[in-house]
Image (spheres, rainbow, N blue to C red):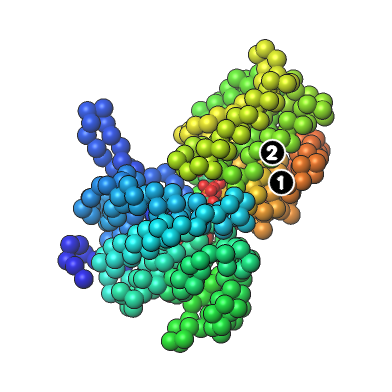
Amino acid sequence: MNNQFEKRSDFVVVANRLSVDRVVADDGSETWRTSPGGLVTALEPVMQSRRGSAWVGWPGSPDEELEPFVHDGIQLVPVSLSAQDVTEYYEGFSNATLWPLFHDGVAFPEYHREWWDAYVRVNRRFAEAAAAVAAEGAQVWVQDYQLLLVPRMLRTLRPDLYIGFFLHIPFPPMELFVQLPWRAEILDGLLGSDLVGFQIAGGASNFIHLVSERLGYPTGDDTVTLPDGRVCAARAYPISIPTQRFADLAADPAVQERAREIRAELDDPELLFLGVDRLDYTKGIKHRLRAFGELVTSGQLDPDRAAFLQVATPSRERVEEYKMLRDEIDRIVGRINGSVGRIGRQPVTYLHTHYPREEMVAMYSAADVMVVSPLRDGMNLVAKEYIACRRNGDGALVLSEFTGAADELSEWTYSINPYDINGMKATMLRAATDAPEERQRRMAALREQVFTHDIDRWAESFLADMG
Ligand code: GDG
């Protein structure tokens, strides 16, 4: 073990990205800022409360060797990736093999042996960095599909550690998973953990079933007993959001004013639909726009009175499938606006850019109907954020049954199958026209669920079970 760290840490998070973003000032000087992402927000209190916690991750640009440094009391351990690693491990195996395969194969997964070699090589680098910074008996929490091999590698290096893993995306059914040429290695990688967390119970049971069928290890409802007698548990921990923070922002008078402005800038529609996503083929953006387009073209919705605001944040822009999706969405939006728009009034406003959180909250506050239509999604935080922001208890959430969020929320959402365009059209209309009391009743129940199940509860329950 090396001695490059002054103190070793009792709690270590290992994630593809570091918890900080680089900020370059006008004079060219560089500093780091804690990243605004949900995971960082969730884990910050836990990390601050423990002695010298550490976060192992990639700083975000290729070919950069950085020494470990301390930021806001957290020890940051940068893992370097070459440009080739980024292409093969990150864009390749993580985002063009595992991502589509784990999302029901909604895009075709590509299998390349050199991508796999890079994935193994980079996972080992993360495991070695974590092994070097973790104190004797420390808790190490590994995050997500980019690092599926890390638990086993880390256990081999450091059998004294408690190792947890959380998968943010779905865990596929056996029939899909077994396509993977490296299925045995990946299962073994995860089984290096003491506890594997999934978004929903179905993911955990897919995993247990697979291990039982393929490896023949003895399994219980939520446990696997390994040949050396060690037990690996697999359970659901549905992730959530910092609900109160969203609610507080929505209550800010400046944000409320901005919400009014947004409606005015959209030419004061009577009915405003909203979609917010990373531009990703799993999110069903095309499907929802097609449904809305048919509703306004057929006259079931009046194109002079209804508007759709779609934000699609740029994502994975160098991956081929994402470039194609962007072109297709441009075409669909152009066709709708070209056929039913008029001068000064376009039914679809499509924004391919990233906004500050205040602007997102103003949009959530402005929209009458939120449409969340993924073909498959681990959880979907946008759905929960919309609920948190509906401070007056109004608004309606149209939610795909193929999201993790539907497991918790579908009793009170307007539930859709995004492959069924007619069904989606009918449900979007219903969400828009139901009696206000019915919409309020549903929203009250949704708010109760999201306020009592926030991100702190998620992190606390996982860590408590990790031991
Ligand atoms: C993965 C899983 C799981 C989006 N545009 C902007 C912006 N966002 C924020 C949203 C939300 C987050 O990004 C997206 O989270 P999702 O959960 O919807 O989706 P993924 O990015 O695919 O996340 C997913 C999640 O991990 C957590 O486990 O729920 O299933 O796929 O917070 O608000 N935020 C800002 N500007 C934008 O333009 N500030």
Q: Nearer the viewer, residue 292 or 13?
A: 292
Q: Residue at x 32, y 58 (%)?
A: 56
The image quadrant that residue 54 belongs to is: bottom left
Q: Which residue is drawn at 26% across and 40% down?
A: 31
10 Å crowding of disc 1: few (<14), some (14-19), many (20+): many
Up the image or down, 116 lies above or below 467; here it is above
Would the CB of label 1 be found within 8 Å of ligand 1? no
Q: Looking at this view, is 279 or 92 the one in front? A: 92
Residue in front for this viewpoint, 277 or 91 = 91
Quadrant in the picture for the N terminus: bottom left
Q: Residue furthest top?
A: 343
Residue 91 visible, this orientation: yes
- Picture coordinates of residue 405 (x, y %)? 63, 54
Q: Residues within 10 Å of mark 2 (few under 14, many from 20)?
A: many
- Estimate the spatial distance between the alpha carbons at disc 2 and disc 1, rounded to whole Å: 7 Å
Say which residue label 2 marks: 288
Across and down, in percent, residue 142 comes to 41, 63
Question: What mark, if any, has residue 418 been given in the picture?
Answer: 1
Name the amino acid type tagged 1.
Answer: Pro
Residue 154, percent from left and from top: 35, 71
**Front position in the image: 255 or 57:** 57
Side (left or right) of 203 relative to 117: right
Q: Residue at x 30, y 50 (%)?
A: 82
**Disc 2 and disc 1 in contact, CB within 8 angstroms:** yes
Left or right? Give the position of 17 relative to 412. Answer: left
Residue at the front extreme? 113
Q: What residue type is labelled 2?
A: Arg
Q: In this view, does 451 lie above or below 363?
A: below
For the image, the number of numbered tags is 2
Q: x%, y% of residue 197?
A: 52, 66
